[in-house]
Image (cartoon, rainbow, N blue to C red):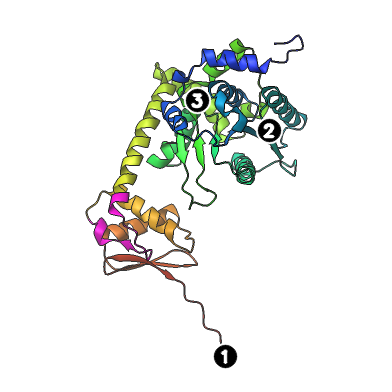
Amino acid sequence: MTKRGTPRWPAAAARLAELLPPARLHPAVLAWAAARPKAEPWAVALSGGSDSVALLLLLWAHWPARRARLSAYHFDHRLRGAASAADARFCARACAALGVPLVAGRRPSPRPLPGAAEAREARFAFLAGALARRKTKVLWLGHQQDDIAETLLMRLARGSGTAGLAAPRPVHAFPPERKGGRGMVHLRPLLTLKKAELAAALRAAGAAWREDASNAGPGHFRNRVRAEVIPAWVQAAERDALAGAARSRELLEEDQAALEAWVDALAPVAADLSLSVSGLAGRPRAVVRRALHRWLLAQRQPSRLSRQGFDGLLRAVEAGAPVRHSLGSHGFAVIRAGKLRFQPMRKPSTPH
């Protein structure tokens, strides 16, 4: 650190890389990165917090050949007044010292957002647009082991399946056909590390970061899980519960991948967008559920099915009997002759 407390960022990055060598990062991310073309642009989401700062420094230090194609992205939500603006200035100074271009965005209005979901939406809308303009499809994110445990407990509360409980993934490739996907890849190499480990390593390396005071408030579900549930859960477990959650996440991701591969092999959705109900007969419900999800996503008209509505349609597909099931205002799911098809809603006839 300098006398004014400003980090010597290149030196801090080099020291952090010594403290956290590649072997401490997630092996799936390392393998993915090693196979990528050298000219591929990489982006890192930089909030200014300890996780994202550690990620930026490790990317800069461990992949020096990539520095010329590395950029950082910061979004100012404008929710904390002068503190939000200070976050942006901090990120700009760190990036300038490392020679990393910073792309900054700012929410137009400082008015409070309804909740954490809206803030996340705004941030990812900025990232999607900025990355598309710069033709960048690789985004590095600073999630770590504490985030795994928080996400797992939050999603258990809403009844998520393996796909939801396997998040956040170390390598998450979005299919090009998905809305906003564009073939994007999200990388999270810090999932093998705890937040406290990252903070300790940053201090030892002489780095700095910004603390978001709003993360300590009880206003959001994640904050309450982080402050109240996780500490009590870790204490009750009398073991490394965070590492246990990370292990469970890995196993859930393996199970999810196996089920998806099973559905791939069945190829239940035909070119005419029908679903082979007869071809799914006798298959495990988990396989039928995923096939039905794919059929719904493949339809040109969006469906508005509640969880209860989906479960009802799932039971109909399992039964295989002829049925006509409402999909909201756009039409019906119709099972006939061993096929599930979408039947659009008939428009009312216009009187002459």
In 3D space, how far apart are the residues under numbered discs 1 and 3 (Cα atoms)? Answer: 67 Å
Residue 259 disc label: none
Query: Can you say whether 180 is above or below 35 in the image?
Result: below
Q: Nearer the viewer, mark 1 or mark 2?
A: 2
Question: Disc 2 vs disc 3: Cβ atoms closer than 8 Å?
Answer: no
| Residue annotated with mark 3 | 190
Residue drawn 26% across the image and 56% down it? 280
> Would you say 152 lies left or right of 116 here?
left
Residue drawn 41% across the image and 36% down it? 166
Tell me which label, 2 or 3, sits earlier in the chain: 2
In 3D space, how far apart are the residues under numbered discs 2 and 3 (Cα atoms)? Answer: 21 Å
Query: Is 268 included in the stretch rendered in magenta?
Result: yes
| Mark 3, other Cα within 10 Å: few <14 / some 14–19 / many ≥20 | many
Residue 102 disc label: 2
Residue 97 position in % (x across, y down): 70, 22
Amino acid at the residue labelled 3 = Leu
In 3D space, how far apart are the residues under numbered discs 1 and 2 (Cα atoms)? Answer: 62 Å
> Would you say 262 lies left or right of 230 here?
left
Amino acid at the residue labelled 2 = Leu
Residue 178 position in % (x across, y down): 49, 51
Q: Which residues are magenta?
A: 264-281
Residue 259 position in % (x across, y down): 31, 44
Residue 229 position in % (x across, y down): 50, 26
Residue drawn 73% across the image and 13% down it? 5
Residue drawn 49% across the image and 35% down it? 37
If the image is split into quadrants, where does the N terminus sit?
top right
Question: Disc 1 vs disc 3: Cβ atoms closer than 8 Å?
Answer: no
Residue 45 in sight in this render: no
| Residue annotated with mark 1 | 352
Give the image quarter of residue 152: top left
Query: Can you say whether 249 is above or below 176 in the image?
Result: above
